[in-house]
Amino acid sequence: MDKGRTQNYLLLTLLCVPFIWALSNSMIIPILPKIQTALDISPIQAGLIITALSVPTALCLPITGFLSDRYGRVEVMIPTIILYGLGGFLAGIAGIILSYPLLLVARVLQGIGATGTTLLAMSYAGDLFTGNQRTKVLSYLEATNSIGKLASPLFGTMVAALVWYGPFFVYPILSFLIAFALLTLRLKPKHGGQKQSLTEYFHALVNVLVRLKRSIPAALASTFIAVFVWFGNLFFLSNIMATQFSIDGISRGLLLSIPILTVAITAILTGKYLKTYSLPRLTAFGLGVMGITLALGTLLPTSFLLYAMVALVGTGLGVTLPSLNTLIIGAVEQGERGVVTACYGSVRALGSAFGPLAFGWMMNYGTVVTLLFASALALLGSALAYFLIND
């Protein structure tokens, strides 16, 4: 097979990796009310189903990044993707036997396996492509992630209409297919092949943070805020659809797909024009759109919450994440890319872990307080990006 065709197959396979990662939480959030009813658990316990996956991902990503720098991206991706699928299978079994503790254990395993998905695919793309081509590919990866998030609420609610734990069995099917494709194609990414110790590896991260001073820490803080607000808002919307508007099943899945569709479309358009505009300014603009939209949600009719707000918040995120991807991944050399990307992934995972929990807690104080809290955070992220991140 010629090099060009191999590279095309490689890109196609890599685009599938963010897709399965996108299903990790986005497919489960719309069915959390069903899970609550089936397992007789509280909203906070339901939020822990999301946290149980995201926290292990955040904690283990630096180790996965270290292993990928040392042994190769694909060599680490295959076993972790398999583990991700096995965790999903175990979660499905937990649903069958109605075991909440086993479900949490299964989600922890999924979280560990998820460390070998999107961020390693991004690292590989950063290794393989350069310049404008790298920017486009990274935007495509973010867009594919968004498309997975777009499909997952609807897909999750459709499968859950048959049996509530059905969505958990989707993970092993897709994961094993992708792992098999990677193994069969023997796609070996370019990597530094460094034989660093773990201490040297983390020392390299500290050196990057010191060398780039305010810029990378501010970019990571903006990333956390964007993802925190995004997942918290989805959790918030899923709950008010069930409790205040009695919207259930496929209708809820369709409504939760609206913001994700705007993320995907905006991410593609942003990728096309990233080189034209200042990346820090784009990041600040995207977070600003999120913040202003959430603030307007306290003033406008409830129909704005269900339709316009979700779409506009998705638009803001679609501008923010591609800009941050390029800023962070492009800021370092290939030898440092694994550790920096892993740190970036950990921050994203922590945002998705604590967003639903924080919003679940804030909802005790009412819709207005929740939205103002989210708006203030988004605007803080916008200010950090505007004043502290360098091009």
Image (cartoon, grey):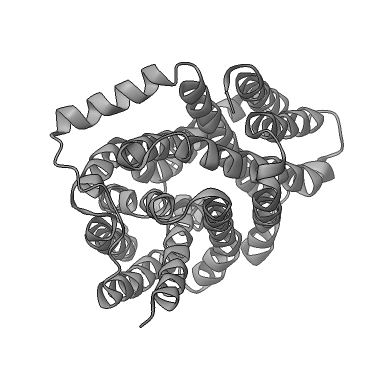
Classify 51 as above or below 162.
above
Classify 100 as above or below 186.
above
Q: Position of residue 83 (x, y in %)?
A: 24, 59
| Left or right, residue 339 beside residue 275 | left
Question: How many discs mark residues in the rendered view?
Answer: 0
Asked where in the image residue 305 lies, by quadrant, the reply is top right
**Is residue 79 shown to the viewer in this render?**
yes
Task: Determine the residue positioned at 28% across, 47% down.
Answer: 108
Image quarter hosting the C terminus: top right
> Of residues 253 and 161, which is closer to you in this image?
253
Q: Position of residue 5 (x, y in %)?
A: 44, 78
**Is residue 342 shown to the viewer in this render?**
no
Q: Position of residue 122 (x, y in %)?
A: 43, 51
> Of residues 269 and 153, which is closer to you in this image?
269
Asked where in the image residue 44 lies, by quadrant, the reply is top left
Q: Position of residue 48 (x, y in %)?
A: 40, 40
Image quarter hosting the N terminus: bottom left
> Of residues 211 and 51, which is closer to you in this image?
211
Residue at the far bottom in the pictured view: 1
Task: Determine the residue positioned at 19% across, 43% down.
Answer: 194
Asked where in the image residue 209 lies, by quadrant, the reply is top left
Task: Determine the residue positioned at 55% across, 28% down.
Answer: 222
Classify 47 as above or below 25.
above
| Left or right, residue 85 beside residue 155 | left
